[in-house]
């Protein structure tokens, strides 16, 4: 049996107000943490930025203040986009530790490494800083959260592989052979350099659960395995993977995902081939390959709810529902329409899927406005 566990990603926690990411439902979150810990799991992943910078504080209240420190592991990430000078690394880490109420992190990552943010991280000497943090005992393991192609990852590992313990990698069967994400190639590189892999986006922000009916029927015909279980089993079956993160938003989701990892079963060769076929089918029905991480939203000067519009666009392309047009209308009044895009391009730097967001917003305009 493969030694891999379910990690609790604190990025998509339950909310009391779906339009306010800071409104974490602490009662439901507490139930989820208690159930997760009771099942024997212990790995929590958060970030300076998650839930409008409230994820760390919520973990402090629900986890750190209620459980012995040695009973759990916490991974946190330095927000690369806030690095202007070398001293910012320590300042931001101190804030993260204070928010969490801990003296050290089990895993300290440099967040969202891509071509643009790699330059910021190197300019601020972030790689040297995380090594120093490990040497001083403020982090037990260090590494990066990676969002780019394999060629950049190889550059990073060639240059810093001697200090990097972990690469947090977007890995799922939809992106396994995708030419933008390159999950397979990136995972092979981590294996080549002997780096531990923590999987993020195994369900791609819900994309691999909310598939078109015609695709769902093919899964149902093949077996009674749930869509979430397929995605989690695929991610956990890959080489060097020790933790598969899932951003769960309810206790029911938590229970279902824990069940998958209690007696984890690796996928077979036949199942792998089936999932590769299904990846092709899903791509045919998905117009915009968004993972709904919301990183782009906070950087949008026009206040456009970009992932919401992409979700509506995908839904309309599959189902052609009048309700999609109505929801677009009310959302565009509350926030801003897609046509408010100034094409500044800032959002593109933050996009974990490397999408040409301004161009895609024009497609949304053509469909809904």
Image (cartoon, rainbow, N blue to C red):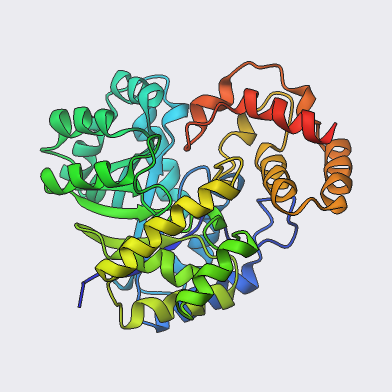
Note whether residue 340 is visible.
yes
Residue 283 in the image: x percent, y percent? 52, 47
Q: Is residue 66 left or right of residue 16?
A: left
Q: In the picture, residue 15 is in which quadrant? A: bottom right
Instruction: Report the front residue among 5 and 54.
Output: 5
Please determine whether, in this image, residue 313 is positioned above or below residue 46. Answer: above
Residue 22 in the image: x percent, y percent? 66, 51
Q: Residue at x 32, y 73 (%)?
A: 71
Q: Is residue 78 left or right of residue 70?
A: right
Which quadrant of the rendered structure holds the C terminus?
top right
Q: Residue at x 54, y 42 (%)?
A: 289
Please determine whether, in this image, residue 111 is positioned above or below residue 166. Answer: above
Q: Residue at x 64, y 60 (%)?
A: 24
Residue 353 in the image: x percent, y percent? 48, 37
Q: In the picture, residue 310 is in which quadrant? A: top right
Residue 66 in the image: x percent, y percent? 46, 74
């Amino acid at each position: 049996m493969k030694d891999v566990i379910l990690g609790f990603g604190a990025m998509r926690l339950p909310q009391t107000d779906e339009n306010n990411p800071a409104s974490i439902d602490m009662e439901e979150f507490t139930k989820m943490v208690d159930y997760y810990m009771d099942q024997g799991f212990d790995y929590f992943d958060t970030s300076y930025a998650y839930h409008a910078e409230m994820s760390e504080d919520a973990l402090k209240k629900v986890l750190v203040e209620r459980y012995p420190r040695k009973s759990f592991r916490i991974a946190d990430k330095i927000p690369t986009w806030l690095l202007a000078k070398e001293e910012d690394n320590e300042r931001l880490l101190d804030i993260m530790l204070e928010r969490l109420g801990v003296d050290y992190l089990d895993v300290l990552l440099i967040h969202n490494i891509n071509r643009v943010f790699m330059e910021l991280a190197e300019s601020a000497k972030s790689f040297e800083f995380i090594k120093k943090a490990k040497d001083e005992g403020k982090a037990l393991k260090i590494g990066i959260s990676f969002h780019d192609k394999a060629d950049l990852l190889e550059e990073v590992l060639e240059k810093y592989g001697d200090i990097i313990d972990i690469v947090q990698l977007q890995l799922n069967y939809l992106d396994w052979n995708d030419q933008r994400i390159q999950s397979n190639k990136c995972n092979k590189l981590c294996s080549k350099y002997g780096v531990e892999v923590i999987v993020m986006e195994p369900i791609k922000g819900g994309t691999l659960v909310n598939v078109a009916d015609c695709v769902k029927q093919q899964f149902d015909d093949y077996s009674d395995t749930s869509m979430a279980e397929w995605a989690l089993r695929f991610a956990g079956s890959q080489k060097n993977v020790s933790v598969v993160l899932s951003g769960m938003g309810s206790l029911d989701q938590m229970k279902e995902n824990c069940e998958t990892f209690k007696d984890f079963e690796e996928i077979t060769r036949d199942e792998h081939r089936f999932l590769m076929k299904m990846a092709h089918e899903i791509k045919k029905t998905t117009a915009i390959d968004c993972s709904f991480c919301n990183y782009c939203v906070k950087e949008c000067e026009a206040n456009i709810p970009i992932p919401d519009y992409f979700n509506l666009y995908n839904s309309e392309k599959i189902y052609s529902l009048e309700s999609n047009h109505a929801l677009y209308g009310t959302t565009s009044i509350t926030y801003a329409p897609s046509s408010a895009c100034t094409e500044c391009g800032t959002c593109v730097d933050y996009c974990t899927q490397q999408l040409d967001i301004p161009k895609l917003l024009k497609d949304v305009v053509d469909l809904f406005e």
